Image (cartoon, rainbow, N blue to C red):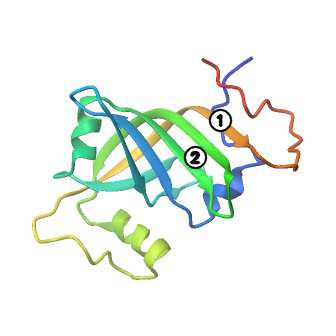
């Protein structure tokens, strides 16, 4: 069975809600790191932001592999797990972090960076998607096997 590489319609709404993502990556010492982030889904990719001074940035310079878990804000037992690789680009004009501020804070500009802070945009290139609904009586009917791990 092929791996899912697109977001199934049964779970697409999770990405349109104002929820948070849990980003897992590998640290240079081999340990795993997991952080909660605000994100934007542009219809094709998941993107989030960090500072060049943060460990998360150094982790992705070391190893671009990522798993992003996005629970439904209305039902944490319903979630998307997205696996792939991160591409890093500079957010020199701060337009992306300001998009995050508008979506999550209802502010035009992100207010918490300090002078000299350098922002980057982290874009997840999706390699595999796993859509789950657990601990519910609701049955999701789709043509796709939503629990397929493909491993």
Looking at the image, residue 28 sits to the left or right of residue 64; the answer is left
Residue at 62% x, 35% y is: 129
Rate crowding at label 2 as few (under 14), some (14 to 19) or many (20 or more) other CA atoms within 10 Å: few
Quarter of the N terminus within the rendering: top right
Residue at 24% x, 35% y is: 61
Q: CA distance from mark 2 to mark 1?
A: 15 Å
Residue position marked by numbered label 2 in the rendering: 44
Residue position marked by numbered label 1 in the rendering: 130
Q: Quadrant of residue 132?
A: top right
- Residue 113: x and y in percent read 21, 70
Q: Nearer the viewer, mark 2 or mark 1?
A: 1
Q: Judge whether 95 appears above or below 109 on screen.
A: above
Q: Check residue 58 in the rendering and tell me which mark sits there, or answer none.
A: none
Q: Secondary structure at mark 2?
A: loop
Rate crowding at label 1 as few (under 14), some (14 to 19) or many (20 or more) other CA atoms within 10 Å: many
Residue at 10% x, 65% y is: 116
């Amino acid at each position: 069975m092929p791996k899912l590489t697109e977001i199934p319609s049964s779970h697409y709404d999770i990405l349109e809600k104002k929820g948070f993502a849990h980003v897992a990556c590998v640290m240079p010492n081999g340990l795993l790191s997991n952080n909660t982030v605000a994100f934007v889904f542009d219809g094709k990719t998941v993107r989030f932001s960090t500072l060049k001074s943060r460990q998360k940035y150094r982790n992705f310079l070391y190893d671009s592999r990522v798993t992003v878990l996005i629970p439904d804000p209305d039902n944490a037992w319903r979630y998307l797990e997205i696996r792939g690789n991160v591409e890093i680009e500079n957010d020199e004009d701060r337009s992306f972090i300001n998009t995050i501020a508008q979506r999550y804070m209802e502010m035009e500009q992100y207010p918490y960076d300090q002078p000299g802070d350098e922002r980057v945009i982290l874009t997840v290139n999706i390699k595999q998607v796993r859509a789950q609904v657990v601990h519910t009586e609701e049955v999701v009917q789709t043509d796709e096997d939503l629990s397929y791990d493909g491993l």
